Image: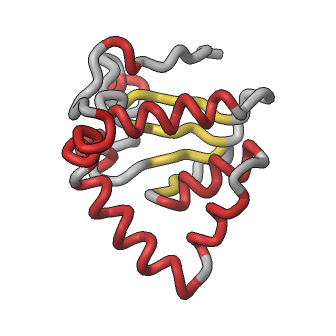
C-alpha cells in the first residue's frame, strides 16, 4: 500500500471516484477507508473524522498525511492514468484549484444531487475493498 485514502462513503460522487481509482489500481497500491465505518475512529485514532469530512485525507506508506487535491493527484499518479490532474499542482493553478476543491467538498451532497439525483448513498454506493 502506497496510499490510504479516507473518503466519505455517503457521498455518491466521492464513492464513484474511489471506484474509478480502484478499477485502475491493479497493483493494489491504494487502500480505501470509509470515514463512516463504525470502527473508523478506533482503527485510525490519528485521523480527526470531523476534519476529514471537510477535506479529503490521505496517508502515505511513510505516514505522511496529505490533504485535498494533494491526495487526488497522488492517487491518480499511482494508477498511471489521468496525468492531466497533475496540472492542478502547478503554482499558478494550485491556489485556484484548492479554493474550488474546498467549495466542492463543502457542498458535495448538493452537487451530488444535482449531478446524480442522489444526495447521499444507500448501500449500492459501497465499494468492495480488500483488507490486508
Q: Quarter holding the C terminus? A: top right
Image quarter hosting the N terminus: top right
Q: Residue 108's x, y, as percent?
A: 27, 47
Q: Residue at x 57, y 70 (%)?
A: 88
In the image, what residue occupies the spot 49% across and 20% down?
127
- Horizontally, residue 57 falls left or right of residue 1, namely left
Q: Residue, x 56% and y 17% (percent of image)? A: 129
* Percent position of residue 11, x then y: 31, 34
For residue 116, what is the image quadrant?
A: top left
- Taking depth in this image into account, of 118 and 26 the one nearest to the observer is 118
> Total number of numbered labels?
0
Query: Nearest the camera: 23 or 7?
Result: 23
Q: Position of residue 125 (x, y in %)?
A: 39, 20
What colouring style does the render use?
secondary structure
Please report the residue visible at 61 percent of the width from the left and 79 percent of the height from the top. 90
Q: Residue furthest bottom?
A: 92
Please state the horizontal and vertical placement of residue 43, each as a whole percent of the image.
42, 24
Q: Does residue 124 appear left or right of residue 79 in this picture?
A: left
Please state which of residues 51 and 28 is positioned toward the viewer in this rendering: 28
Position above or below: 84 against 8: below
Q: Is residue 71 above or below residue 25?
A: below
Amino acid at each position: 500500500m502506497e496510499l490510504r485514502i479516507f473518503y466519505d462513503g455517503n457521498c455518491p460522487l466521492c464513492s464513484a471516484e474511489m471506484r474509478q481509482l480502484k478499477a485502475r489500481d491493479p497493483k493494489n497500491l491504494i487502500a480505501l477507508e470509509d470515514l463512516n465505518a463504525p470502527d473508523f475512529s478506533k482503527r485510525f485514532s490519528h485521523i480527526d473524522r470531523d476534519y476529514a469530512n471537510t477535506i479529503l485525507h490521505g496517508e502515505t506508506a511513510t505516514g505522511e498525511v496529505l490533504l485535498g487535491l494533494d491526495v487526488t493527484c497522488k492517487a491518480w499518479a499511482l494508477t498511471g492514468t489521468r496525468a492531466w490532474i497533475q496540472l492542478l499542482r502547478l503554482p499558478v493553478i494550485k491556489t485556484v484549484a484548492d479554493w474550488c476543491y474546498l467549495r466542492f467538498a463543502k457542498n458535495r451532497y448538493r452537487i451530488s444531487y444535482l449531478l446524480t439525483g442522489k444526495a447521499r448513498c444507500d448501500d449500492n454506493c459501497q465499494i468492495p475493498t480488500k483488507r490486508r
